[in-house]
Amino acid sequence: QITALVSDIDAVEVIIDEKQEAIEEKNEEIGELNQVIEESNDKLKERMKIMYEYGSASYLEIILDAKGLSDFFSRISIVKDIVNHDKELIDTYVNSKTELEAAKSVIQLEQKEQFEAKTILEDKKSELQDAQEQKEALISELNSDIDALEEQEQKAEEDYNSLKAELEEALAEQERQRKGSSSSASAASFQGS
C-alpha cells in the first residue's frame, strides 16, 4: 500500500510540474500577444491620427480627384493598399485579442487542474502518512508480541530448568535411598551370616 501511494504521489507531482510548465508557456505566449496587441494598437492609433489630420476625405473622393486615367488607376491601387493594410492591422489586433483570451482561458484551466492535482497530492501524502503510522504501530505491536514471546520462552526455559533440577534431585535422592536400603540389606545379610 505504501509503495502504491508513493507511486501515486510521484505521478501527481509529475502532473503538477507539467501543468506548471504549461502555465509558464502560456504566460510567455500572453506576453508576446500583449506586445503584438500593443504594437497593433499603436499602429491603429497612428492610422486614426493620420486620417484625422487629413480630414474626412473618403476613399471615393481620393479616387475621383484623379487627374487622368493613369492617376485614377494609381489612386485605386494606393487606396486598395491602404484598405488592405488597415484590414491587416485590424485583423492582427482582433486575432491577437482572441488568442490572448484563449491563452488566459487555458491558464485558468491549467491552474484549476494544478490546484486539483495539489489537493489530490495532499490527500495522497496524508494517506501515506496514515499508512506509515499504521505500519509503525504494527511494527511496534509485533515487537511487543516478540518481546512477550521471548519472555514466555525464557520463563518456560527457566521452568524447564527448574523442573529438570528437581527431577534430577528426586532421582538422585531415590538413588541414594536405593543404595542406602541396598547397603542396609547387605549389612543385615552380612550380619546374619
Image: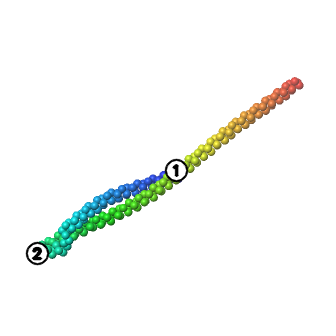
Percent from the top left, x then y, of residue 190? 86, 24
- The residue shown at (89%, 25%) is 192
Q: Residue at x 79, y 32 (%)?
A: 174
For residue 129, the mark is 1
Residue 37 on image: x %, y %: 29, 62
Looking at the rendered image, the disc whose residue lies closer to the viewer, 1 or 2, is: 2
Q: What amino acid is labelled 1 in the image?
A: Gln
56 relative position to 150: left or right:
left
Residue designated by label 2: 68
| Residue at the outermost left position | 68
Residue 73 appears at what percent x and percent y?
14, 73
How many discs mark residues in the rendered view? 2
Label 2, residues with CA under 10 Å away: few <14, some 14-19, many ≥20: few
Q: Quadrant of residue 112?
A: bottom left
What colouring method underlies this structural image?
Answer: rainbow
Residue 61, above or below 163: below
Amino acid type of the residue tagged 2 in the rendering: Gly
Q: Residue furthest right?
A: 192
Between marks 1 and 2, how big is the CA–CA gap?
89 Å
Q: Residues within 10 Å of mark 1 (few under 14, many from 20)?
A: some
Q: Quadrant of the C terminus?
A: top right
Task: Please indicate whether residue 34 sits to the left or right of residue 5 in the image.
Answer: left
Task: Give the quarter of the image for residue 177.
Answer: top right
Mark 1 or 2, nearer chain start: 2
Q: Is residue 80 visible?
A: no
